[in-house]
Amino acid sequence: MAKRLLPASWLKKNEQALRRLIAWQYKGSKYQCNICKAKLRLFPTNKLQQKICPNCGSLARTRGLWDLIQNEIKGKTILHFSPPVSLRKAIENRIATGKYITSDFAGEFDSDLKINIEDIDLEDDYFDLIICYHVLEHVTNDKKAISELFRILKPVGICYIQTPFKEGEIWDDEQINTPELRLKHYGQADHLRVYSADGLTVRLEDAGFDVERIERVNEPENHNGFKPRDTILKGRKFNSNSN
């Protein structure tokens, strides 16, 4: 309701204060956000039925990613696309002597740069770690974007990628070309396709990545509010100079 009644700029500026006002209602000990460490009696859900931390705003997928990468980032050079504020702060606090660059092309998130992922104006073999979560389903030429991610990643560097996944083949139909049709068929008005984990793995491998498929299975009511089932693709860059 607040989003409908108040200007977006005001909400963005005062988000943390508003969250603190709301979060006290959920204080408890049964659950804990592993990003901001808030102890909660429950994780409330948003309109998409995603468990959200009332204190920092993290989603279940974000908490799952942090659990995966938090011990990998110290001293690394990192590029993070569309960084949620909760995870951005956690990485900034942990990275120490590393370098952390953020980008959001659509202007939805605070970021350092506005990078076109299909044509990245950054040097080859630069990043140790790239985070590309829920981005590729919005990109017109995803194969070009994937090749660009591979290009700027250092040899033996890692790229964590996730999108909404379904079973079967990638669903990418040129006739589904309006927001209304995309909402109907893809589940969101600004999604351009729906991936399968197998299909996206093939596209990553075609670009040169060595791909590990990570399947995380958790109890539905787990302590940190992780997704019951979470699929993450971990692409590593190997080439003749890294063997």
Image (tube, grey):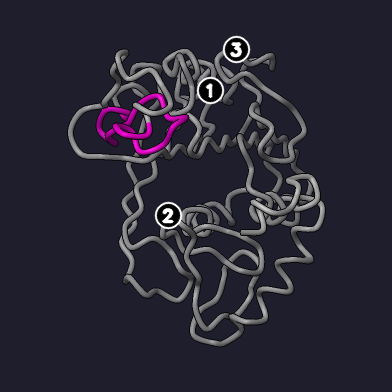
Q: Name the element at disc 3.
A: loop
First along the sequence among labels 1 and 2: 2
The quarter of the picture where residue 188 lies is: top left
First along the sequence among labels 2 and 3: 2
Magenta run includes residue 5: no
Magenta run includes residue 194: yes
Disc 2 and disc 3: Cα gap in Å? Answer: 32 Å
The quarter of the picture where residue 131 lies is: top right
Tell me the amino acid under the disc marked 3.
Answer: Asp
- Chain part drawn in magenta: 183-201
The mark closer to the camera, 3 or 1, is 3
How many neighbours does mark 2 have within 10 angstroms: few (below 14), some (14-19), or many (20 or more)?
Answer: few
Disc 3 and disc 1: Cα gap in Å? Answer: 10 Å
Task: Give how far across and how far down residue 56 sits, in percent.
Answer: 66, 63
First along the sequence among labels 3 and 1: 3
Given residues 171 and 146, the one toward you in this image is 171
Task: Give how far across and how far down residue 182 sits, in percent.
Answer: 37, 28
Q: Which mark is residue 119?
A: 3
Q: Is residue 160 above or below residue 56?
A: above
How many neighbours does mark 1 have within 10 angstroms: few (below 14), some (14-19), or many (20 or more)?
Answer: many
Tell me the amino acid under the disc marked 1.
Answer: Leu
Task: Count the marks.
Answer: 3
Q: Residue at x 46, y 16 (%)?
A: 140
Task: Give how far across and how far down residue 55 sits, in percent.
Answer: 66, 69
Q: Residue at x 75, y 56 (%)?
A: 93
Tell me the amino acid under the disc marked 2.
Answer: Leu
Q: Which mark is residue 48?
A: 2
**Circle 1 sits on which residue?**
149
Task: Give how far across and how far down residue 117 sits, in percent.
Answer: 58, 20
Q: Residue at x 73, y 39 (%)?
A: 100
Which quarter of the rendered picture does the C terminus lie within? top left
How many neighbours does mark 3 have within 10 angstroms: few (below 14), some (14-19), or many (20 or more)?
Answer: few
